[in-house]
Amino acid sequence: MKCPKCGHDNPSDTLFCEECDWRLDVPYRPPKKRNPLAFALVSLVVGAAALALAFLDGTEIVGLVLGAIGVLLGSYSINVPRLLNSENKTLCVSLAGIGLILSMIGFILGLIAVVGA
Ligand SMILES: [Zn+2]
């Protein structure tokens, strides 16, 4: 019996795939493809916006919030391509890394401005 997950040809009396341990009577649905590059780009944009807003007068609080979002998005974008082993892994991780750093600086600058004001 052919495994619905990995395609391995198993003897007909087996219930679990010899190759990947998938239950052979359960149809396999591949996980939804996420686009890690889009996430990385968004975290980069959010990070840059956070940094810019943290510098501007009166928008430090927005920079602070955006910075926090950017840090979350950035760390997510770094982990997703690593887990998915996507083809644009290096690019995604670099973009998300820059976004993460920008967000952190934006967050810290925003925090200093808000606390100091
Ligand atoms: Zn299998």
Image (cartoon, rainbow, N blue to C red):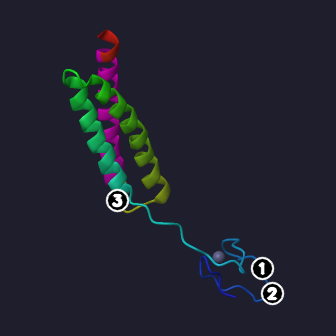
The numbered disc on residue 13 is: 2
Is residue 90 in sight in this rendering?
no
- The answer to whether residue 92 is above or below residue 60 is below
**Apparent side of residue 49 relative to residue 34 in the rendered image (left or right):** left
Q: Amino acid at mark 1?
A: Leu
Frontmost residue, 116 versus 102: 116
- Image spot of residue 115 (x, y percent): 35, 13
Alpha carbon of mark 1 to alpha carbon of mark 2: how far?
7 Å
Left or right of residue 4, residue 78 in this image: left
Residue 40: where, in percent of width, then height?
34, 49
| Element marked by disc 1 | loop
Q: Earlier in the sequence, mark 1 or mark 3?
A: 1
Which is more toward the observer, 61 or 6? Answer: 61
The quadrant of the image that shows the N terminus is: bottom right
Element assignment for label 3: loop
Q: Is residue 19 magenta?
A: no
Q: Is residue 98 magenta?
A: yes
- Pointer 1 residue: 15
Question: Where does ligand 1 appear, by image quarter?
Answer: bottom right
Q: Position of residue 94 (x, y in %)?
A: 32, 46
Residue type highlighted by circle 3: Asn
Q: What is the C-alpha distance between the residues marked 1 and 3?
A: 37 Å
Q: Which mark is residue 88?
A: 3
Residue count near mark 3 (Cα–Cα under 10 Å), binned few <14, some 14–19, many ≥20: few
Q: Could you tell me the amino acid type at mark 2? A: Asp
Residue 4 located left or right of residue 36: right
Instruction: Find the magenta span and give its range.
Output: 91-113
Q: Earlier in the sequence, mark 2 or mark 3?
A: 2
Question: Image quadrant of residue 66?
Answer: top left
The residue depicted at 30 percent of the width and 40 percent of the height is: 46
